[in-house]
C-alpha cells in the first residue's frame, strides 16, 4: 500500500497580531516539521480505518482525511472510491497539526496516485479550504506563514536533522478557546531574515492563554527549560504540546529519559527536524 508520513508540525514562533472582522486572527509564524508523525496508507476499502495509540481519541465522523478526499474528488473527478488506513501516532488537539498533517498526507497520496503536482494552485486552494495549517503541512518544509498562517514563503536557516523532543502532558486543548483567551495585545512583528534567529528572538503569543486554560503546560515548559543542552524551548501552536531543540542527540535523549522517569504519563516523541 502506498503510504505517506503526516509529519508533526512545530511552530518555532507564533505572533498573533490582531483579530480580523471575520473572526479569524492574523498571525506570523515559522513552521518547521519533525521527521516523524502519523502514517497514512491508501487502501482499496472505501472510507477510513484508524489504528494506533491515539485512534480512540479521533473523531471519524468528519475527519479531515475524508474531507480532503471528498474535496479532491470534487476538484478532479478522481479518487472518489479511495480508502485510507491511518496509524494515529500523534496526540489529538495537541498543537502539532495532527489533523491538518493527516489531510495534507491524503492530498499528497492522491496527487501521486493520479499524477498531479501538489504545487498546482488548485490543490493549494483545496488545502487552504481544509484549514489554515493544511497548506504548510502539504509542503512539510520550513515556511514562514502569514495571514491565517496560509500565506507561505520558504525560509532558510533551519537545519535538517537538528534533534527535537516533543512533550505533551496527555491532555487535549482545543484551538478555539486558546485564541479566545488571547488578550488582544499586538506585541510586535516576527523578525525577517534568518529563520532560526527570528525564532530565538520571537515568542508564542498563545502560550499565556493556553497556560491559563491548562496550567500543566507551564510545568512542561518549566521542566524543559531547566534541562541542559537545549537551544530553543517553546509551546507549539495553541498547545498543549511543547518542544525543545537540542545541540545533539545525546542531550535530547538524556532529557527524554529524565522526563519519562519524572512524568511517565506524559507523551514524548524524540525526533529531528526535516
Image: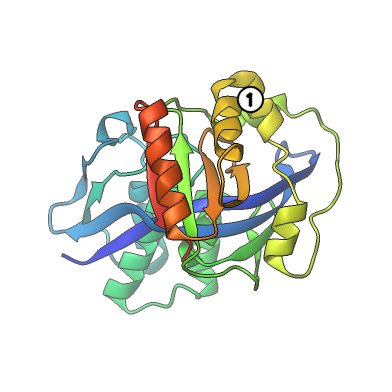
Relative placement, left or right, of 236 versus 250 is right
SS at badge 1: helix
Is residue 31 shown to the viewer in this render? yes
Q: Nearer the viewer, residue 224 or 184?
A: 224
Q: Position of residue 176 (x, y in %)?
A: 60, 30
Residue depicted at x 72% and y 55%: 200
Q: Nearer the viewer, residue 72 or 152?
A: 152
Q: Position of residue 247 (x, y in %)?
A: 54, 60
Q: Position of residue 77 (x, y in %)?
A: 33, 66
Report the number of numbered marks: 1
Residue 52 against residue 262 in the figure, above or below = below
The N terminus lies in quadrant: bottom left
Q: Residue furthest left?
A: 44
Residue 41 against residue 258 in the figure, above or below = below
Relative placement, left or right, of 60 versus 241 is left
Relative placement, left or right, of 70 versus 19 is left
Residue depicted at x 51% and y 55%: 134
**Label 1 crowd bin: few (<14), some (14–19), many (20+), radius 10 Å:** some
Please tell me in which quadrant of the rendered image residue 69 appears: bottom left
- Residue linked to disc 1: 211
Amino acid at each position: 500500500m502506498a503510504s505517506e508520513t503526516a509529519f508533526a508540525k512545530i511552530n518555532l514562533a507564533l505572533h498573533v497580531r490582531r483579530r480580523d472582522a471575520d473572526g479569524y486572527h492574523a498571525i506570523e509564524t515559522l513552521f518547521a516539521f519533525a521527521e516523524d508523525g502519523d502514517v497514512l496508507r491508501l487502501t482499496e476499502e472505501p472510507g477510513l480505518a484508524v489504528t494506533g495509540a491515539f485512534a480512540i481519541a479521533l473523531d471519524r465522523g468528519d475527519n479531515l482525511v475524508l474531507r480532503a478526499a471528498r474535496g479532491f474528488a470534487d476538484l478532479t473527478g478522481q479518487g472518489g472510491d479511495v480508502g485510507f488506513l491511518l496509524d494515529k501516532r500523534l496526540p489529538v488537539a495537541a498543537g502539532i497539526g495532527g489533523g491538518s498533517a493527516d489531510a495534507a498526507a491524503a492530498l499528497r497520496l492522491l496527487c501521486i496516485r493520479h499524477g498531479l503536482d501538489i504545487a498546482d494552485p488548485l490543490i493549494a486552494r483545496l488545502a487552504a479550504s481544509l484549514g489554515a495549517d493544511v497548506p504548510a503541512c502539504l509542503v512539510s518544509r520550513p515556511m514562514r506563514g502569514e495571514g491565517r498562517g496560509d500565506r507561505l514563503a520558504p525560509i532558510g536557516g533551519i537545519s535538517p536533522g537538528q534533534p527535537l523532543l516533543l512533550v505533551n502532558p496527555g491532555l487535549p486543548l482545543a484551538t478555539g478557546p486558546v485564541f479566545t483567551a488571547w488578550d488582544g495585545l499586538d506585541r510586535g512583528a516576527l523578525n525577517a531574515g534568518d529563520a532560526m534567529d527570528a525564532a530565538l528572538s520571537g515568542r508564542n503569543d498563545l502560550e499565556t492563554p493556553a497556560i491559563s486554560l491548562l496550567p500543566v503546560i507551564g510545568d512542561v515548559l518549566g521542566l524543559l527549560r531547566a534541562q541542559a543542552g537545549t537551544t530553543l524551548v517553546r509551546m507549539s501552536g495553541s498547545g498543549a504540546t511543547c518542544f525543545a531543540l537540542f545541540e545533539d542527540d545525546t542531550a535530547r535523549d538524556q532529557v527524554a529519559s529524565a522526563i519519562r522517569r519524572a512524568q511517565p504519563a506524559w507523551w514524548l516523541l524524540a525526533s529531528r527536524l526535516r
